[in-house]
Amino acid sequence: MSKKEVRAAGVRAAGTKTGRAGKRARASSLPPLVRHLLWALLAFAAVVAVSSVVDPFTNVRVATVGYLLLAAAGLTVLTGLTGQVSLGHGAFLFVGAYTVALLVTHVPSLPFWADLLIAAAVSGVAGVLTGAAAARLHGPYLAGATLALAVGLPAITQRFPDFLGGSNGLGFTVNSLPAGLDVPTTRWQAWVVWATVLLGMVVLANITSGRIGREMRAVRDDEVSAALAGIRVGRTKVLAFLVSAVCGGLAGGLQAFLLGTAAPGSFTPALSLTLLAAVVLGGVGSLWGALWGALALVYLQAGAEELAHGLSLRTDVANFLPLAIFGVVLIVVVLVLPQGIHGLLGKIPLRRRKDSHVVEG
């Protein structure tokens, strides 16, 4: 190859790199809200496409991933960004689910989107009260206080069985399918769940990437330094509880909408522990990590159930197999990948860039 051909090839390669860099620059020049909305629209289009070709049972799983994603993302804001370890996140899902159930049962004239907004507001009030009470607690004291909330709140259903349905909970039906839209119920439910979840994720993405997110990280890293920098530590902690509780309440309301029931058995302390484990598994402090954790929760359990069925295990063994497998995977990830699944995926592009630099050199 002559020097002229080599020089021409170098110019073409440089032009290609410049073009790619220009595209990345144009994408990053968009306002964060617009960029996040575009990603949300692409994600919703993908959900619509997937839900249109799978069976109803898989649509339920797709919707389950959605509301678990929102719940885990709210817990990520609380634990990953501000460092407040909560073992009671399931209590906010309980509040949201029962608020939706009571509104659908007693105020059927309200549209479902209004039920969700009210559930988010009620859960937000619960989060502010919890955050104000726990703002001065740290470490195991905070974890113990929130765990007590997760243990005690579902017991209210036994105290008011006529109003909250007792152990059986509240069953209801939401007729939210628009007239003239002929789609299966589970597909429509998956669309509603993911539309709500993606709107919530857009809000969370803007919060975490903006000034509020930076203040939360500063409080997590060093409260004294954050206070000296002018950040109101107590208010930031309460705000994190508010955001987390609103996400949990919406997730609980969507779960009740999907299942058609709100029962205390769905909101045991095990739910809170499982959500925290999902956040750790996916990657603490990352909204993408919440997605990987939600996927792991749904599909590891599905795989464990199929394995138990294939091995013809006894019922008592089969019931605990999903938790056992999830626990083993969590332990392996914590030991081998401290930054979770998202941390592993984040290293792959970096390694590719390093390899390309070596080849170019």
Image: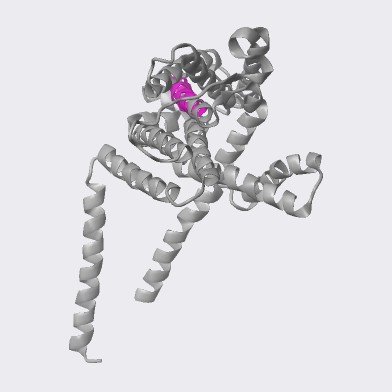
**Where, by quadrant of the figure, is residue 225 drawn?**
top left
**Where, by quadrant of the figure, is residue 192 drawn?**
top left
Q: Is residue 244 magenta?
A: yes
- Asked if residue 356 is positioned above or below residue 85 in the image, the reply reads below
Please tell me whether the stretch drawn in magenta is mainly helix, strand or loop.
Answer: helix
- The quarter of the picture where the C terminus appears is bottom left
Q: Nearer the viewer, residue 93 or 144?
A: 93
At which x and y percent is residue 49?
39, 50
- The reply, left or right, for residue 6 in relation to residue 53 is left
Which residue, as the protein is rendered here, is positioned at the far bottom? 1
Residue at left offset 25%, top offset 60%: 21
At which x and y percent is residue 288?
45, 44
- The quarter of the picture where the N terminus appears is bottom left
- The reply, left or right, for residue 142 in relation to residue 49 is right
- Asked if residue 148 is positioned above or below residue 15 in the image, the reply reads above
- Give the magenta range: 237-252
Q: Nearer the viewer, residue 331 or 126?
A: 126
Q: Which of 35 and 286 is in front in this view?
A: 35
Q: Does the magenta stretch include residue 269?
A: no
Residue at left offset 69%, top offset 47%: 305
At which x and y percent is residue 301?
64, 45
Q: Can residue 225 be seen in this view?
A: yes
Q: Nearer the viewer, residue 28 or 74?
A: 74
